[in-house]
Image (cartoon, rainbow, N blue to C red):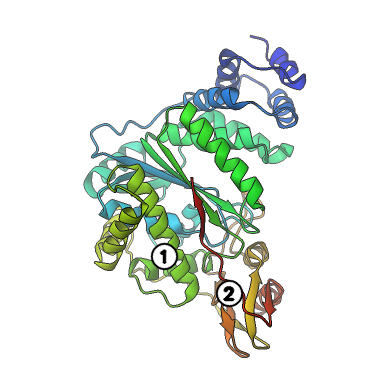
C-alpha cells in the first residue's frame, strides 16, 4: 500500500478504509513510514477530521499495533480510569485504593506531566522508593494479590500511539479531537480493562478550556468507545480552579489526608467529593452498585472505615514504598494573604499551574527535571468568604527568589467580589 496515496486521500477530505488505517498504525509502530509522511497525514487529518467510523478503526488499529495486557485470571470486574488532566488532579492516587477496597481490580498505566497538567507518575515518584517501572507480569501478580497496580506506559503497548503522539506534539495537531480520542482509548483497550471511567476536565486548568469543547470531546469519546465495544462511563468535571494543592510531594500529602478522610480545608474536601462521585460512576458501571448514589455510598464507607487507607498502605508497600514516608521538603515557604474582605470569585487554575512550573514543580519540555518539593498549597475555593489577613496560598520553593516570584503570580490568579459568589459544582454531568 502506498502511504502517499493515504496522505492525499486525507488531504482531499475523502474517507479512509479500515485497511488503510491499520496500515498507518502498523507503519507508525514499526517505523516503516517516515516521520515527514506521518506529519503530513496528521496535518491533513487535523484540517479534515476523521469521522466516527474512521476514528473507531484508527483506535482499534493503534490498540492492535503492539502487545495487549491479558488480565484473565484476575478477579472481575477489571476497571481502568483516565483523566484528561488538570492542575492539582491527584484523583487516581485516591480513587484506586477506594475502588480496590470496594472489590474492583485495577491495573493502570499512567503518564508523566507536561505543561500545567501534572502527571500521576511524577507525584508517585516523589515518594521515596516507589517503583513506577513494573512489568506487565509484575502488575498482574500484584493486582491478583491486593487488587491494584500502576506503572508507566510500556513501549510495547499501543506503540503506534507513542509514535503518533510524539509527532502531534510538534506539528500543532494535538487539539484534533478524533486523534485525541484514538490516543486515549487505544491505550485503554491495550490495557485490558473491561470497564473504563473517563474524567473529562473543563476549564482554565484543563486540556479543554471551555465547557463546549469538553462536551465535544466527551461525546466523541462516548461514541468511539461504543463503536469499539467498550463499557465506558464518562464524567464532565470542573477545572476552572485548581483541584486542591498543586505540586508533587504536596499533592501526595493531600492525597494521604483525603485517604485518611481528614481534609484540612475546603479544597481537599472538594477533592474528596470528586473522588467519591467518580467512585460512584465506576461502581455503577462495573455492576457493583445499582445507581450513582449507592455507588458513592459504598465508596464513602470504604473511606470512612479506613479500608481505603489500608488498601493504599498495601499498594505503596507492594511497589517499594511506605504510605507514611517522609516526603521532600522545600527550603522556603511563603504565604500569600488576603488584602481585603470579600468572596472568592475566580482562581485561575492555569496561572497557578504555571507558577508551579516556574519554580520547578513541572515541565516545559519532556527532558526537564522536576523539584518534587516545589508547589503551591491553595487554601480556598471559589465561593468562599475571605477576611483580610487570611491565607490564600502557601508557596513551597527552593529559594526565596523563586518563592517570591510564584507568590506574585498566584496573587494575580485570584479575584474577589464584594457580593456573595456561588460555589462551583465539581461534577458538571455524568454521561
What element does badge 2 sit on?
loop
Q: Quadrant of residue 92?
A: bottom left
Instruction: Indicate left or right for 305 with 371 as reference.
Output: left
Q: Is residue 420 visible?
A: yes
Q: How many marks?
A: 2
- Residue 413, relative to residue 191: is it above or below? below
Q: Which residue is mark 1?
A: 272
Q: Which mark is residue 352?
A: none
Q: Residue at x 59, y 23 (%)?
A: 54
Where is residue 394? Give x, y as percent.
Answer: 57, 78
Where is residue 176? Give x, y as percent.
Answer: 67, 37
- Image quadrant for the N terminus? top right
Q: Residue at x 35, y 37 (%)?
A: 136
Where is residue 48? Give x, y as percent.
Answer: 73, 27
Q: Which residue is mark 2?
A: 383
Where is residue 226? Give x, y as percent.
Answer: 47, 30
Crowding near the residue tagged with mark 2, few <14, some 14–19, many ≥20 C-alpha atoms within 10 Å: some
Please state which of residues 237 and 39 is positioned toward the viewer in this rendering: 237
Q: Residue at x 26, y 53 (%)?
A: 102
Instruction: Indicate left or right for 170 with 321 as reference.
Output: right
Q: Residue at x 70, y 28 (%)?
A: 45
> Which numbered mark, 2 or 1, is in the foreground of this view?
2
- Residue 91, relative to residue 417: is it above or below? above
Q: Is residue 149 visible?
A: no
Crowding near the residue tagged with mark 1, few <14, some 14–19, many ≥20 C-alpha atoms within 10 Å: many
- Residue 67, relative to residue 290: is it above or below? above
Which badge, 2 or 1, comes first in the chain's sequence? Answer: 1
Q: CA distance from mark 2 to mark 1?
A: 18 Å
Amino acid at each position: 500500500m502506498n502511504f502517499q496515496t493515504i496522505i492525499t486521500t486525507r488531504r482531499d477530505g475523502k474517507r479512509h478504509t479500515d485497511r488503510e488505517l491499520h496500515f498507518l498504525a502498523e507503519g507508525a509502530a514499526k517505523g516503516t513510514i517516515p516521520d515527514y509522511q506521518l506529519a503530513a497525514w496528521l496535518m491533513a487529518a487535523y484540517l479534515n477530521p476523521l469521522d466516527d467510523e474512521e476514528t473507531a478503526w484508527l483506535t482499534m488499529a493503534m490498540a492492535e499495533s503492539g502487545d495487549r495486557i491479558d488480565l484473565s485470571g484476575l478477579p472481575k470486574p477489571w476497571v481502568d480510569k483516565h483523566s484528561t488532566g488538570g492542575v492539582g488532579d491527584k484523583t487516581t492516587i485516591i480513587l484506586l485504593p477506594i475502588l480496590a477496597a470496594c472489590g474492583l481490580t485495577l491495573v493502570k498505566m499512567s503518564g508523566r506531566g507536561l505543561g500545567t497538567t501534572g502527571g500521576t507518575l511524577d507525584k508517585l515518584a516523589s515518594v521515596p522508593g516507589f517503583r513506577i517501572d513494573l512489568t506487565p507480569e509484575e502488575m498482574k501478580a500484584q493486582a491478583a494479590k491486593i487488587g491494584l497496580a500502576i506503572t508507566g506506559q510500556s513501549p510495547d503497548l499501543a506503540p503506534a500511539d507513542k509514535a503518533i503522539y510524539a509527532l502531534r506534539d510538534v506539528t500543532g495537531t494535538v487539539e484534533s479531537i478524533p486523534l485525541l480520542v484514538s490516543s486515549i482509548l487505544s491505550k485503554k483497550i491495550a490495557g485490558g480493562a473491561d470497564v473504563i471511567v473517563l474524567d473529562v476536565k473543563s476549564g482554565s486548568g484543563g486540556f479543554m478550556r471551555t465547557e463546549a469543547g469538553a462536551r465535544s470531546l466527551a461525546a466523541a469519546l462516548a461514541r468511539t468507545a461504543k463503536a469499539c465495544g467498550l463499557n465506558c462511563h464518562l464524567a464532565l468535571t470542573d477545572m476552572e480552579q485548581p483541584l486542591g494543592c498543586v505540586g508533587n510531594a504536596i499533592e501526595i500529602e493531600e492525597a494521604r489526608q483525603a485517604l485518611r478522610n481528614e481534609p484540612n480545608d475546603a479544597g481537599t474536601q472538594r477533592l474528596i467529593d470528586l473522588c467519591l462521585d467518580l467512585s460512584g460512576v465506576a461502581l455503577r458501571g462495573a455492576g457493583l452498585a445499582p445507581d450513582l448514589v449507592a455507588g458513592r455510598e459504598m465508596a464513602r464507607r470504604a473511606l470512612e472505615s479506613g479500608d481505603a487507607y489500608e488498601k493504599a498502605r498495601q499498594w505503596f508497600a507492594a511497589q517499594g514504598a511506605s504510605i507514611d514516608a517522609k516526603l521532600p521538603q522545600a527550603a522556603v515557604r511563603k504565604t500569600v494573604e488576603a488584602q481585603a474582605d470579600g468572596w472568592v470569585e475566580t482562581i485561575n487554575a492555569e496561572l497557578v499551574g504555571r507558577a508551579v512550573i516556574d519554580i520547578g514543580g513541572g515541565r516545559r519540555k519532556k527532558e526537564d527535571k522536576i523539584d518534587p518539593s516545589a508547589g503551591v498549597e491553595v487554601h480556598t475555593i471559589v465561593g468562599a468568604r475571605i477576611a483580610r489577613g487570611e491565607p490564600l496560598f502557601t508557596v513551597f520553593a527552593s529559594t526565596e527568589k523563586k518563592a517570591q516570584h510564584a507568590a506574585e503570580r498566584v496573587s494575580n490568579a485570584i479575584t474577589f467580589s464584594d457580593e456573595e459568589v456561588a460555589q462551583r459544582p465539581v461534577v458538571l454531568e455524568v454521561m
